Amino acid sequence: MDLLLDTHLVVWAMGSPQRLPTRLAEMLEDQRNTPVFSVASLWELVIKQALGRPDFNVQPAVLRRALLEGGWQELAIEARHALAVAQLPPLHRDPFDRLLLAQATVDGLLLVTADSQLTAYPGPVRFMDATAPPT
């Protein structure tokens, strides 16, 4: 199964894997699953970095290199993804999360997210509680 992780979970997977929910860690270790990250997540991280937030220390270029070297697949943003966002009901306002959901839907991926609001959408979404301690 191809697993498209939301931005939050991508950052944790590469920088703090011990913080991942146990079930997600197991899914990422399963050789039958392919971890996927979206260029939308890199774009979101570049924007956060540019804002100069003191609580934010992710280097998007370094993260991308580590993901690719770790065998993750990179998902480009295509017109069909952007156009699919228009088909989503206005249940969530975050444009990056909406684009991730559109990409998952269009490309037949499972979107794994730490944002419970995305579960209100029909489609390939699995919520992983990132606030619960790993078991």
Image (cartoon, rainbow, N blue to C red):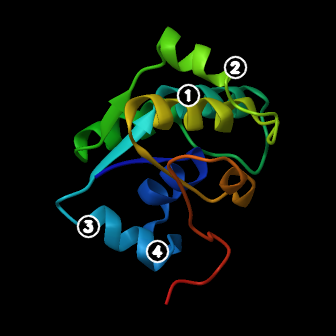
Q: Nearer the viewer, mark 4 or mark 2?
A: 2
- Which residue is identified by label 4? 18
- Which residue is identified by label 3? 29
Judge left or right: residue 127 versus residue 52: left
Q: Residue at x 40, y 34 (%)?
A: 64
Q: In the figure, 29 relative to 6: above or below?
A: below
> Residues under labels 4 and 1: Cα distance?
24 Å
Q: Position of residue 134 (x, y in %)?
A: 52, 83
Asked if the residue at tag 2 contacts the one at tag 4, i.e. Cβ–Cβ closer than 8 Å, the answer is: no
Q: In the figure, 42 relative to 29: above or below?
A: above
Q: Position of residue 46 (x, y in %)?
A: 62, 27
Q: Return the disc, 1 or 3, that comes first in the chain's sequence.
A: 3
Please state which amino acid type lies under the numbered disc 4: Gln
Q: Nearer the viewer, mark 2 or mark 3?
A: 2
Q: Return the disc, 2 or 3, that comes first in the chain's sequence.
A: 3
- Which residue is identified by label 2? 86
Q: Residue at x 61, y 29 (%)?
A: 99
> Residues under labels 3 and 4: Cα distance?
13 Å
Asked if the residue at tag 4 contacts the one at tag 3, i.e. Cβ–Cβ closer than 8 Å, the answer is: no
- Which residue is identified by label 1? 40
Please state which amino acid type lies under the numbered disc 2: Ala
Please state which amino acid type lies under the numbered disc 1: Ala
> Residues under labels 4 and 2: Cα distance?
36 Å
